Each structure stands twice: as structure tokens, then as C-alpha cells.
């Protein structure tokens, strides 16, 4: 459901869709809290959409963006976490997800904030997801808002 903070919604600013991979739910929640706090402080409405893993994030964004619903979305925030394991699966997932999210920006012209963590350990991921200075969800929200403003200025 759309959410707002205590500040009124900024007139003329479309809402943002946060697409979050839920494979590591605690990390996803922390990233989403950071993103939501930035959006609320800016007076921007947002919704959260959960997908199973990082690999599904760019596909979900593209599906929504190309749907009727996507016309009412001003920007997207890709959130999730890939933790390095004993195989090279990690390398394939983060490279392809990163490339696909970049393509959403370059090919589809979407305003996208990238907040997918790629970490060697769960502890590294928790540090980068914790609310506060290092929260990558908050950084992704600021990037998304910046791209939305750039798109608006070019119209």
C-alpha cells in the first residue's frame, strides 16, 4: 500500500516502487526502512513489492514499468542482497542482476536507484543494511529521487 511520512506529499511527484528481494528478509527489511525514510522525508509516496530473490528484481521492475500501473510510477528502487558462497553462483547472479538493472535505466529510461548488496559475508551485508550512515537502501532512494528530478528537468 502507498505510504507517506509525516510530511505532506509533494505535488506533482509520482510515487516510487521499491522492489525488494526477500531471500534475506532481515536485510531486505533494513534496506527498505532506509529507503522509506528518505522517501518519507522527501514527501514522496511509495509502495513495496516483494520478489523471491535478486535475480527477479529487474524482471519485476520491467513488468510493472511496461504495465498500465507503471504509468503512475515515477521511479524504482532495486533492493536485495547476494552473499558469496562456495560456488560461483554468486558471481553470475550479481553480475546479471546489476546489468539488467542498468539496462532498465539505459534502455527503458527508468529512474532507478540501485540498492542490491554484494557482500562476502552476512555480517558485511548487515552493516551495509543497518539504518544509519551506511544504509544502502537510503543511498538507492536518494539516487532514485535524483534521477526522477533529472527526468523532470529534461521534459
Image (cartoon, helix red, strand yellow):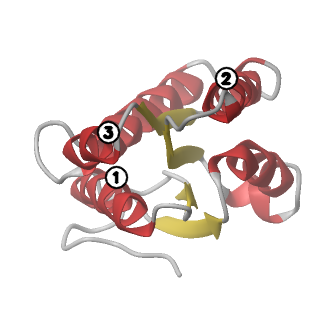
Q: Secondary structure at mark 1?
A: helix
Extreme residue toward the front, this view: 86
Instruction: Give the residue at x 81% y 46%.
Output: 62
The residue pinned by badge 2 equals 95
Left or right of 92: which side holds 107?
right
At x 41%, y 28%, the residue is 146
**Left or right position of 122 against 96:** left
Q: Is residue 59 above or below residue 44?
A: above
**Side (left or right) of 2 relative to 88:** left
Instruction: Please give the label number shown on residue 35.
Output: 1
Residue assigned mark 3: 136
Give the class, few, some or many, for how many residues have Cα within 10 Å of label 2's Cα (few <14, many ≥20): few
- Residue 60 vertical position relative to residue 106 in the rendered view, above or below: below
Q: Is residue 107 above or below residue 15?
A: above
Q: Position of residue 89 (x, y in %)?
A: 69, 34
Query: Is residue 153 shown left or right of residue 145?
Result: right
At horizontal 27% and vertical 68% (from top left) the residue drawn is 8
- Residue 18 at x, y percent in the picture: 53, 57
Q: CA distance from mark 3 to mark 2?
A: 18 Å
Pointer 2 or 1: first along the chain: 1
What residue sits 38% from the left and 42% below the top?
141
Disc 3 and disc 1: Cα gap in Å?
Answer: 8 Å
Of mark 3 and mark 1, the one earlier in the sequence is 1
Label 2 to label 1: alpha-carbon separation: 23 Å
Corner quadrant of residue 4: bottom left
> Which structural element holds mark 2?
helix
Q: Using a 10 Å C-alpha cutoff, classify the residue at mark 1 as few (fewer than 14 neighbours), some (14 to 19) or many (20 or more).
A: many
Observer-side mark, 3 or 2, equals: 2
99 vs 35, nearest the viewer = 99
The secondary element bearing badge 3 is classed as helix
Quadrant of the frame with the C terminus: top right
> Along the line of sight, which residue is nearer the eye, 79 or 151?
79
Amino acid at each position: 500500500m502507498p505510504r507517506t511520512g509525516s510530511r505532506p506529499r509533494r505535488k506533482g511527484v509520482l510515487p516510487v516502487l521499491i522492489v525488494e528481494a526477500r531471500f534475506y528478509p532481515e536485510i531486505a527489511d533494513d534496506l527498505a526502512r532506509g529507503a522509506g525514510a528518505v522517501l518519507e522525508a522527501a514527501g514522496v509516496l511509495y509502495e513495496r513489492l516483494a520478489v523471491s530473490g535478486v535475480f527477479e528484481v529487474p524482471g519485476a521492475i520491467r513488468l510493472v514499468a511496461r504495465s498500465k500501473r507503471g504509468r503512475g510510477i515515477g521511479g524504482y528502487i532495486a533492493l536485495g542482497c547476494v552473499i558469496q558462497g562456495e560456488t560461483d553462483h554468486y558471481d553470475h547472479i550479481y553480475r546479471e542482476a546489476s546489468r539488467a538493472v542498468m539496462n532498465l535505466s539505459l534502455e527503458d529510461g527508468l529512474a532507478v536507484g540501485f540498492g542490491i548488496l554484494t557482500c562476502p559475508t552476512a555480517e558485511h551485508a548487515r552493516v551495509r543494511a543497518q539504518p544509519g550512515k551506511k544504509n544502502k537502501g537510503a543511498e538507492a532512494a536518494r539516487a532514485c529521487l535524483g534521477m526522477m528530478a533529472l527526468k523532470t528537468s529534461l521534459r
